[in-house]
């Protein structure tokens, strides 16, 4: 995976903030910081090298008012918006694959049942299955925050997890 440091002239990664989504092609890196219960959803078409990243905060936009104003806020509407924008850029719907990361349950609230992180993961899996998009990799759950970097050209999703001892674990999906 191509990542960009501070070398002069290197392209700046596109930051995808909470409730946002972005679609790109080639070697441009899309990055989301601070995924706790939020879920990073990366979709890509390996043939066209077009992909997108969403930083979804909540599971169910269909049940929320005004979800069409900020589709990246919800796992289900983020997936549909990413697919639509990717196809508009030239991706083939039938070739698109998905990877997800995040969905931690950082805090326990027994009175609320499943945490938001777990509900985000379930909502994304359900929406992907409903739309026929294969989920090819995931790094979800637990109680640690994550940062992700996604390169649509290669489909590589780099997941960084900060450990309690100050080290950082890195996994490529």
Image (cartoon, rainbow, N blue to C red):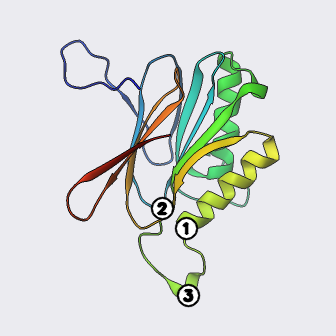
Q: State the separation of the CA atoms marked 1 and 2.
A: 6 Å
x and y, in percent, of residue 133 in the image: 74, 39
**Is residue 64 left or right of 33 when viewed as pictured?**
right
State the mark number for residue 91. none
- Specify few, some or many for label 1: CA neighbours under 10 Å numbering under 14, 14-19, or 20 or more: many
- Classify 35 as above or below 15: below
- Specify few, some or many for label 2: CA neighbours under 10 Å numbering under 14, 14-19, or 20 or more: many
- Specify few, some or many for label 3: CA neighbours under 10 Å numbering under 14, 14-19, or 20 or more: few
- Earlier-in-chain disc, 2 versus 3: 2
Q: State the separation of the CA atoms marked 1 and 3.
A: 13 Å
* Rendering quarter of residue 122: bottom right
The residue wearing badge 2 is 37
The residue wearing badge 3 is 111
- Classify 166 as above or below 148: below
Give the structural element (helix, strand or loop) at label 3. Answer: helix
x and y, in percent, of residue 171 in the image: 41, 44
Residue at 59% over, 44% down: 137
Residue 5 visible in the picture? yes
Closer to the camera, 59 or 94? 94
Quarter that holds the N terminus: top left
State the mark number for residue 116. 1
Q: State the separation of the CA atoms marked 2 and 3.
A: 17 Å
* Rendering quarter of residue 170: top left
Decide: marks 1, 2 in contact (CB < 8 A)?
Answer: yes
- Earlier-in-chain disc, 1 versus 3: 3
Give the structural element (helix, strand or loop) at label 1. Answer: helix
């Amino acid at each position: 995976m191509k990542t960009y440091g501070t070398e002069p002239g290197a392209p700046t990664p596109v930051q995808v903030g909470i409730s946002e989504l972005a679609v790109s092609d080639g070697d441009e890196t899309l990055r989301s910081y601070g995924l706790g219960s939020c879920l990073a959803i990366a979709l890509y078409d390996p043939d066209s090298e077009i992909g997108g990243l969403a930083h979804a905060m909540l599971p169910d936009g269909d049940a929320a008012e005004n979800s069409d104003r900020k589709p990246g806020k919800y796992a289900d509407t983020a997936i549909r918006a990413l697919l639509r924008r990717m196809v508009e850029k030239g991706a083939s719907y039938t070739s698109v694959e998905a990877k997800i990361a995040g969905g931690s349950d950082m805090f326990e609230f027994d009175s609320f049942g499943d945490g938001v992180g777990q509900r985000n993961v379930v909502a994304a899996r359900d929406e992907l299955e409903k739309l026929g998009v294969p989920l090819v990799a995931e790094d979800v759950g637990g109680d640690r925050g994550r940062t992700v970097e996604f390169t649509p050209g290669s489909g590589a999703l780099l997941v960084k997890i900060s450990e309690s001892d100050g080290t950082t674990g890195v996994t490529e999906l």
